[in-house]
Image (spheres, rainbow, N blue to C red):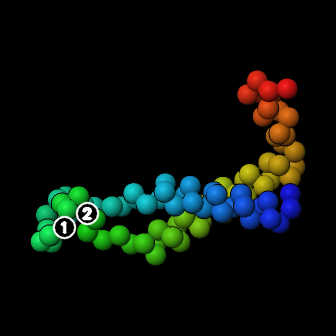
């Protein structure tokens, strides 16, 4: 796997993980009972975005390492995946 392919795969995994991590620990203003005038009751009270970015990086790195090891040690090949999906 070239470095550019690895970076592209990591980039995509990072974004997917970000959207998976964003809802973690979110509490809406309605749930907290702390309303700010002029905002939606479903708006989050505290986003903790720095913590979520850190968790996203950790989760994406673990997933990328697993994917890289599977392909580096040929535990699963693209031909196998293609045959499972009904390809040639």
Q: Which of the 4 quarters of the picture holds residue 30?
A: bottom left
**Whether residue 61 can be seen here:** yes
Q: Residues within 10 Å of mark 2 (few under 14, many from 20)?
A: some
Question: Is residue 28 left or right of 2 when viewed as pictured?
Answer: left
Residue 55 is situated, as x and y percent measured from the top left of the image, at: 52, 66
Tell me if residue 13 comes above or below residue 50 in the rendering.
above
The residue at 79%/32% (across/down) is 82
Provide the secondary structure element on which disc 2 rests.
loop
Residue 26 coordinates in the image, percent (x, y): 33, 61
Residue 64, percent across and down? 70, 57
Quadrant location of the N terminus?
bottom right
Q: Which mark is residue 43?
A: 2
Q: Which mark is residue 52?
A: none
For the residue pair 6 and 61, the one nearer the viewer reads as 6
Count of picture labels: 2
1 and 2 marks in contact (CB < 8 Å): yes
Q: Which residue is mark 1?
A: 39
Q: Residue at x 18, y 60 (%)?
A: 41
Q: Determine the secondary structure under disc 1.
A: loop
């Amino acid at each position: 796997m070239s470095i550019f392919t690895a970076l592209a795969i990591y980039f995509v995994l990072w974004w997917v993980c970000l959207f998976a991590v964003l809802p973690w620990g979110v509490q809406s203003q309605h749930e907290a009972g702390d309303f700010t005038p002029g905002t939606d009751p479903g708006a989050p009270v505290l986003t903790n975005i720095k913590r979520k970015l850190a968790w996203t990086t950790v989760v994406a790195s673990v997933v990328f390492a697993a994917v890289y090891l599977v392909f580096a040690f040929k535990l699963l090949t693209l031909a196998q995946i293609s045959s499972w999906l009904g390809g040639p």
